[in-house]
Amino acid sequence: MQMKRSFTLRLFGFSFLSFLISVTELPSAGYADESPAGFTSLLADDSLDGWSHQGNWSIDSGVVAREGSGGPLTYQGGPLPDNFELRFEWKVAKGSNSGIYYRPGQYEYQILDNTTHRDGTNPRTSAASLYFCMQPSRDVTRAAGQWNTGRIVCKDTVIQHWCNGVKVIDFDYEDPRWQFHVDLLNKRGGNLSDRGGKLWLQDHGDPVWFRNIYLRTIPDEESLQRSEVTPANIPNDVLKKEAEKLEGIMKRRQQAREAADEKQSATRRPNIIYVMADDLGYGDLGCYGQSKIRTPNLDQMAAEGIRFTDHYAGHTVCRPSRLVLWTGQHVGHTRLIGNASHNLTGSETTVARLLQDAGYATGGVGKWALGNVDTPDEIDNAGHPNNNGFDYWFGYMNQSNAHNYYPAFLWENDRLVTLKGNVIDDVPNGRGRVAKAKVTYSHDVMVEKAFEFIRRNASTPFLLHMHLTIPHANNEAGRVHGDGMEVPDYGIYANESWPNPEKGFAAMIGRLDSDMGRLFDLLDEQDIAKDTLVIFTSDNGPHHEGGHDEEFFDSNGVLQGSKRSMHEGGIRVPFIARWPGKISAGTTSDWPSAFWDFLPTACHLAGVAPPKSIDGVSYLPALLGQTPAGGDRYLYWASSEGDTSVGIRRGRWKLVNYPPTQKRRPKTGIPAIAENGWRLFDLANDPAEENDLAGQHPERVRRMLEEVRGDGLWDEPQPAHGLKN
């Protein structure tokens, strides 16, 4: 007892001991009636001011009680901080059930009488659990009718639950050890990366009481005291019942999706088809100024829809660009700034998962660059598209293998599909990506699989990604044979007096254009053209690989740079959208947009709230001839590839940063510079970025850099930058 009295005296007598309460076990007698140092009390003695309810909650002498059904008691003081500590006391009657919700995404501290309520038989749904996600290490609750102390600590990706002075949960949800637990919550519709939720006390129809609710924001510089907390073991018979319960939950969710689809049949949400070419330049299409390569179907798409003149890829190369597209975050926040191998963890919020949860059928074909699979025994990994929101995927599961247009096999979900007649050559330097027998062209197979997906899902809203590999070079074939532009035939370009790689490049684009025409015919055939938004773009600028020279067809148009360059030619890409009856025919938009805007746009179309952590804004208004909200922002890229490391655009102004050494092949004669430096360009008057204006506008350079630094992107200097605050 003496120890408890000493603790109380220290708490109120010495300021430095306010720290002790955050790192030691809580006193078993409960919290003091006065706010602990650094905390704010959320309850008054005799008033529920600041809380909302339906008349079913009351307070007397600081004790909140539920009195009849009507819904939760919700704190109205705004969303909880991202990093916070919440303290409270609770008690329940015999057999009672309640909870404290503290973030969106199914975060619930379970309040329960473990001894008599059925949820108490499963540690994962018992008192102090993170409900249906993480079980406490042991049961330390007191008998029904007695007060318990509770504590919730959230800092970044770490979650801690305490009960009666004992830390019973302490885990980082990005730690792979806990992936199974995270997946359980995902299957219930939850997401541990969500932030900004309100605090509310659950009404489960049972008697429950709360008091002494205190909240504090955890400063960024404060470190949590971590310790190994082993979740309680769950018996096999309980796991079986849990699986049955989860099956029921998922069945009800599916039924809810079906009911929602039926309800919205009169005002159907649109289908979304996102077609992405690979290494197609800004100037490679007729509607963007190309004169040698014929693209009649894409030109017709632009004539029937809208063409963006200032649309940007997520990066200068493939993998990081696609990660930006999936997540709605630019590379300053995804932190992937080069083509190094990177698998999704399954916990990211992807556009496919958001629309899947909203009832969309989700499918994709082509190159999947974020769940690397070289051999069949690697197929079961968290980065697989089926684990990231896609009901269906057909294509490549290895980015480098996608160089080869005549592979021995592709993947259909988790099933290996052999491509008839293709035989790989073991030629030196081929790396298993050069074929000696070429029968089945992978692009053709992937397009047919996409068309099959459309036919299967024509009666329901769907999201389809066609991430095709044309006109990327087979780099290995280019090194071995001098020509990496693989295509079954040169078609209308066979008799041109061009080098073979250039004939192949043009023929590849012609093949892609023909397939776009077939796609529009299929939408008409299925009578869903007016219900379908089709977007066409490219993942980055044009390449100089496989024997192809991007200057042969002037693939950049007037722009400087190509793939791997932070100049406009490396990141500004074609963008065409068609939606009959919605998008005005033959229009253009110069509103600066980028890959990270697709996720909020798709959510806008599907009626889904996008995550708050994204960088993008919906460009749906721009598609419809209006000005999008939230467009007063900077666009940002960082790269460990090529000779330019950072690009920042704000309005008409563009900053480009160069690393200390360069090996540049300047298109417009700009000389290389010997040390780190920023160049400023006025894109409205100088889209080719030929005139550096940094010396004339130092204040503008300073303001643009301060804005980006203020967003925390350079708090930890990224290797590609060489920058320090």
Image: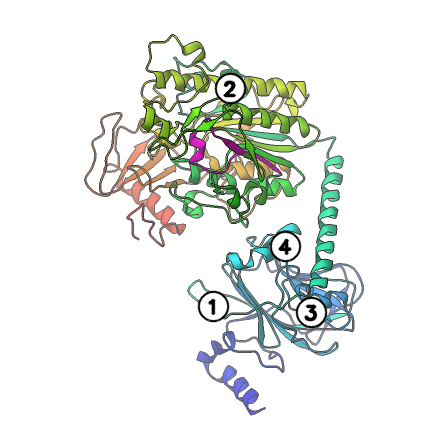
Q: Residues within 10 Å of mark 2 (few under 14, many from 20)?
A: many
Q: Residues within 10 Å of mark 3 (few under 14, many from 20)?
A: some
Q: Position of residue 233 (x, y in %)?
A: 63, 67
- Label 3 near label 2: C-beta < 8 Å? no
Please name which of the two marks, 2 or 4, marks the residue nearer to the observer. Answer: 4
Please name which of the two marks, 1 or 2, marks the residue nearer to the observer. Answer: 1
Residue 224 is tagged as: 1
- Label 1 near label 3: C-beta < 8 Å? no
Left or right position of 125 against 481: right
Disc 3: which residue: 47
Image quadrant of residue 483? Answer: top left
Mark sitting earlier along the chain (2/4): 4
Residue 302 is tagged as: 2
Rendered-image quadrant of the N terminus: bottom right
Mark sitting earlier along the chain (1/4): 4
- Indicate the secondary structure of the residue bearing disc 3: loop
Q: Position of residue 270 (x, y in %)?
A: 64, 30
Residue 544 visible: no
Residue type highlighted by circle 1:
Leu
